[in-house]
Image: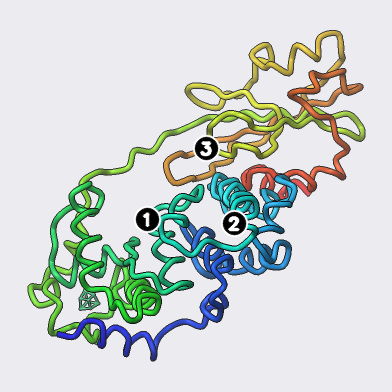
Amino acid sequence: MDLSQILLDWYQQNQRDLPWRRTNDPYAIWLSEVILQQTRVDQGMPYWFHFMEAFPTATDLANADEQEVLRLWQGLGYYSRARNLQAAAKVIRDEYHGIFPNQYGQIRSLKGIGDYTAAAIGSIAFDLPHAVVDGNVYRFLSRLFAISTPIDSTIGKKEFSELANELLDKNNPGIFNQALMEFGAMQCKPSNPDCSICPFMQHCQSYTSNSVSEYPVKSKKTKTRNRYFNFLILSDEKNTIIQKREAKDIWQGLYQFPLIESENKNHSTIDLSNADVAQHLKGSSYNMVKASTVVKHILSHQIIYAKFWWIKLENIPSLDANVYIAIPWSRLGDFGMPQLIVKYLEGED
Ligand code: SF4
C-alpha cells in the first residue's frame, strides 16, 4: 500500500478550504494551530481572523496590551494559550528580530509550543521533516494498523510518533501532515467513520477485523473536579468591583467579581465574613438584592457551579488597590472576563 499517495490523492479532493492553508506565514500557521488546540474549526476561525487583523505580526502581538489579547481570546477558554502566545511573540521580537525562527529546536523552545505544534509549524511553513501526531492521527493510525497500545501512555506516544515519522513523506512533509490530520478529522472520525467509502478500506486492519470501534485504546479516564463559585456583584448606582485572577489556576490574568469558593455546594445564603472583600465593607451599608440560580459551566477537567450574589452598596468603600478595582459598569467590557461571567451578564441584560 502506498499510504502517502493514497492520502495525498484523498487530500487533494477532500481538503477544506481554510484561510491558514493559503499562506506559508509561520506566524499565521502558529496562531491557527494554537487556537485549534482545544477548539473546533468553525468556532476558532473568527478568532483567527480577529487576531490576524488586530496583530498581523508576532511583533504586533508582542507589543499588545495583555488585557487586549485576553479580551480577544475571550470565549476560547484555556487562557494560558493566549498568555503563552504573547510570551513567545516577545521572544520572537527580542531574540529573532521579529522573524519567526525556522529551526525545529528554536520553534520547539518557544513557550506553549510542544512537539505537535513545533512539527506542524516546522513542516507546513518550512518543510521540516517532522511528523505531527494529534488526536486525529492517533485515531487513524491506531485503526489502520489495529494498534492497541494506549495512546495516552508514554510508550504509546513514542510508538505512534515513531510510526508517523516512518510514514512521513519527506518530500512533502507539510502537505502530508495536513493530509494525515484532515483524514482523521473528516474521514476516520471518532464516531461513525465512513469506512464504506474509505480509500484505505482494504488495508485497514481494524475494518477488516470488524473492530473499528475498539480503537484508539486509552488507559486512563480523566478525572473531573467539581467547584462551587459564589461571585459577589457589589455595586452602587454607577460602579461595581472587580479583581484580577492572579493565582495559577483556571482563568489566570482575567477579571472577575470578588469570589468566595465553597467546598461542597452552592448554598441558599452566603456568609460574607468568609470574603476577603468584606473587610472593606465594614461600616458601609449594603443590601443583598438577589441571588441567581446556579449556573453550570463545563471545562475540560472541571465543572464549575456558580452563583451570582447581587449586593447593593450605598457607596463603594475604599478598597485595597492592589487587589480590587472599582469601575463604572460601562467599562466592564474593557476587561477580559471568563465566558461564564460574560454569558451570565448577557442573560441579565
Ligand atoms: S476503513 Fe474506517 S477505520 Fe479504517 S481508516 Fe478508513 S475510515 Fe478509518
The label shown at residue 304 is 3
Label 2 CB sits under 8 Å from any ligand 1 atom: no
Give the vertical position of 211 relative to 244 (above or below).
below
SS at mark 1 in the image: helix
Comparing marks 3 and 2, which lies closer to the viewer?
2
The quadrant holding residue 279 is: top right
What residue is pinned by disc 2? 96
In contact (CB < 8 Å): disc 2 and disc 1: no
| Kind of residue at badge 2 | Tyr
- Of pointers 3 and 2, the one earlier in the residue sequence: 2
- Which residue is rendered at x = 79% and y = 18% of the image? 320
| Kind of residue at badge 3 | Ile
In the orientation shown, which residue stands out farthest toward the left? 209
Label 3 CB sits under 8 Å from any ligand 1 atom: no
What residue is pinned by disc 1? 115
| Kind of residue at badge 1 | Asp
Disc 3: CA contacts within 10 A as few (<14), some (14-19) or many (>=20): some
Q: CA distance from mark 2 to mark 1?
A: 21 Å
- Which residue is rendered at x = 38% and y = 70% of the image? 128
Disc 1: CA contacts within 10 A as few (<14), some (14-19) or many (>=20): some
Give the vertical position of 282 relative to 183 (above or below).
above
Q: Position of residue 63 (x, y in %)?
A: 73, 52
Q: CA distance from mark 1 to mark 3?
A: 31 Å
